[in-house]
Structures are given as C-alpha cells and as structure tokens.
Amino acid sequence: MRTSRSLIIIGGGPAGMAAAIEAARAGLNLTLIDEAPRLGGQVYRRPPEAFRVEDAERLGRDFARGERLRAEFSEIAERVEILSGTSVLGVWPDREVLWARDDVSGVFRAERLIIAGGAYDRPVPFPGWTLPGVMTAGGVQVLMKTMRVRPGRRALVAGTGPLIVGVAHRLHDLGVEVVSVLEAGDHRWVSGGVTAATNEWDTIGDVRSSLEALGRAGIPLLFNHTIFEAEGADAVEAATYGPVDAEAWQPRKDRPRRVEVDLVVTGFGFVPNTELTTLAGCRHHHAPELGGWVPVRDALMQTTVPGVFAVGDGAGIGGVLVALEEGRIAGITAAELAGTISADEASGRRAGPIDRLLSLAEVRALLGEISQIKPGLLELASPETLA
C-alpha cells in the first residue's frame, strides 16, 4: 500500500504535537505517526485509559502541561490522521516512509516530512549496571508517570543535571526512601544559572521546588560524586559510590561508601535519536552540547534535505519548551510550503516561537554545558563490565 500525504509528522511527543497543531491551524491536513498507544511522548506521558485520575495535582506539573497541550490538539484533531501504535521502519529518498502496525504495513510518500524522534537515556557502564534494579531515569519515570508504581523501596540516584533532582523528588513522593542524590558535576546549576531561570526553564519540572523538597526530606545532594558499583546476586542489594575529580570526573575509588539499596537510578543525560534523519539522507554534525550527532538545520528547522524538518530532542537535546517551539516553527513552515498560508502570514505566526527560542537560548546553553559527561567516567567500567 503506497499512498501520498501532504505532510507526515513522525513522533507524537511535544514537538510532533506542536507541529501538528500549527500546521492544522494553517489549514493543512496531515498524518501523525507515533509508536506509543497515546500521544504525549516521554515527558507528557499519561496513565492508561483504564486508570481514573482522581487527583491530577499529585501527578505533577508535567501532567498538567500535557493536558493543556492535548486540549490544544483536540481543537484541530479533525485535520489530523493519527496512526498510533505504529512504527516507522525506514525513511527512503523522496520522503518515502515505511510504516508497520500489527500485521499491516505500507509506504507513504510525504510531500513534506517532520521528524520528531525524541531521545534516549545515555548509558554509562559500571560494574553491576545490568543487574535488575539498575534503571535509567527515563525508565523509572515511565513506571512512575504511567502506572504510579514504586520501582523500589530504597534508592540511590546518580547522574548529572537537574533531571536527577526531579526524579529523586518524584521517588520520594511515591514513598521510596532516597538515600542520596549523586551529582557528578559541581553546584553551579543549583547556586545560580538554572535555578535563577526556573520561570524560563521548566522542561523537567520545577527545579527549585524539587531542591526544596529534597532539603525538607533531609535527602543529601552530593556534588562531584557518582556511582562506583551495584552489587547483588540476582538483583541490586547494595551500591558503592564516592567522589570524583572535579575536572575530568575520574572516580576516587580510595574513598568509597557502601549503602544497602534495591534500586539504583542513573541519569547521565540523553542522546538524540537520529536514525530516521540519517536514513532520510540529512547531513549531521557533532555537537556535544546538544547530546552528540545531530542533523544540520536552518533557522526554520529544515534539514539539508528539502522538505524534511527535524525538531525536538531528536535534533538536539533542549527539553520540552524548546521542543514545543521548534515544532511550532516547523509546522508553520510546512503549511507555508504547502501554500495554505502566505509567506507574510507564516512569518507573523513564527515570530512568537522564534522569540521564545531566543529567550531560552542562554539557559539551554548552560544546561547543555552541565549535561556533558566527562571522560573520567569511562574509568568506572572494568574489562569484566563490558565482557
């Protein structure tokens, strides 16, 4: 089955939803493909439909923001063909998209294509990292956001950047005893920068609120510290951690501390999902501050392949606010290229999102710098760790 579509958006997270909203508002009919059963992505993930939400406030600010975006999306839903639970297996030349759902598959040819593939947790290997009970921050958030599941009873949280503080806060709210939060970097993002700009940067929730909650609970936040090893026979039973060198984050294993835990959460940042932009033939460049290899784009989010746009964390780690504005810019531009709005109207509609991106640029750069892991962490892994 090979059919044409005026616009295809791959990815139903914040960036993809925002792109669909703006394109549809501009009069463009489109197809939105997402592998999850419901739209929202990782950040705005909802509990299953069988669950009844009785106290939305307890689900946090991300849930409320996601509901607002869904309400915005519902206003234009009649213009959107939604293919949920659908995987994109390939993007070929001329913007051909190979998709599959259950036992059905086909190929769409997109006149315009927006790729919003998201990102995945950056793995950092250390002894015991494959034991049951060692989880990434992203994996833990899926359990907490969708199922309200406590992933453990006693946890150690390690990584870098404000995300680990938000995860520790949510774990504590669910009744998990968090013994410590280990930040491999220094205290800059707590003492200035990010916390000073919290009103401008809520991609991972309210950082200041999480810090205050950890303080009230007496949960230590240890800077220049990280996980050394997870121990256990069939699952995590204990973990060893300690200080790292401030410059390169080399572990100082002569000063270890051991704690009994059944959960180790690691959050060392994210890596952009660039598989589809690579298959589409887009040129990429290496930008460590954006998470690694990312597609080259112009100011309107178009890649080096005409008619192909890349937005959100799959085009460079920036968080949900950046993803939303990039999606809006791409959706407006796709409608302009389709001729449903004039160049002048498109320029006017893009002005707000472009200004918003500019206002986010400084704090995005700061978080990008903070989230870059240092080479010393590679010394955590022994030959047996990667065998």
Image (cartoon, rainbow, N blue to C red):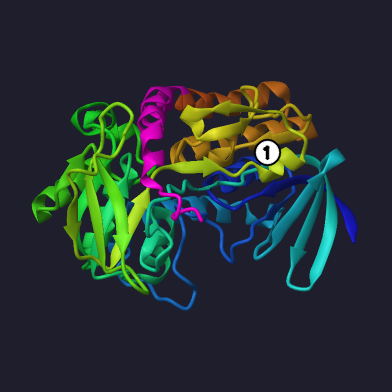
Residue 339 visible (yes or no): no
Q: Is residue 359 magenta?
A: yes
Q: Is residue 333 above or below residue 320?
A: above
Could you tell me residue 333's position as x and y percent?
A: 68, 31
Residue found 56% across the figure and 58% down from its top: 39
Tell me the chief SS of the magenta region: helix
Q: Measured along the vertical axis of the image, is residue 91 above or below residue 337?
A: below
Quadrant of the image occupied by residue 345: top right
For the point 29% across and 50% down, which residue is it? 228
Query: Which of these two is toward me, 373 or 150?
Result: 373
* The residue positioned farthest toward the bottom in the image shown: 50
Q: Can you identify the residue that label 1 sits on?
A: 26
Q: Position of residue 120 (x, y in %)?
A: 52, 49
* Residue farthest to the front, as pictured: 383
Q: Position of residue 217 (x, y in %)?
A: 11, 55
Residue sitting at x 67%, y 44%: 275
Q: Amino acid at mark 1?
A: Ala
In the image, residue 266 lies at what x, y percent? 36, 52
Secondary structure at numbered mark 1: loop
Q: Quadrant of residue 200?
A: top left
> Is residue 7 highlighted in magenta?
no
Tell me: 340 left or right of 326: right
Q: Is residue 215 visible?
A: yes
Q: Residue furthest right?
A: 2
Q: Which residues are magenta?
A: 358-387
Q: Sort mark 1 into few (<14), some (14-19) or many (20+) by Cα contacts within 10 Å.
A: many
Front residue of this view, candidates 28 and 300: 300
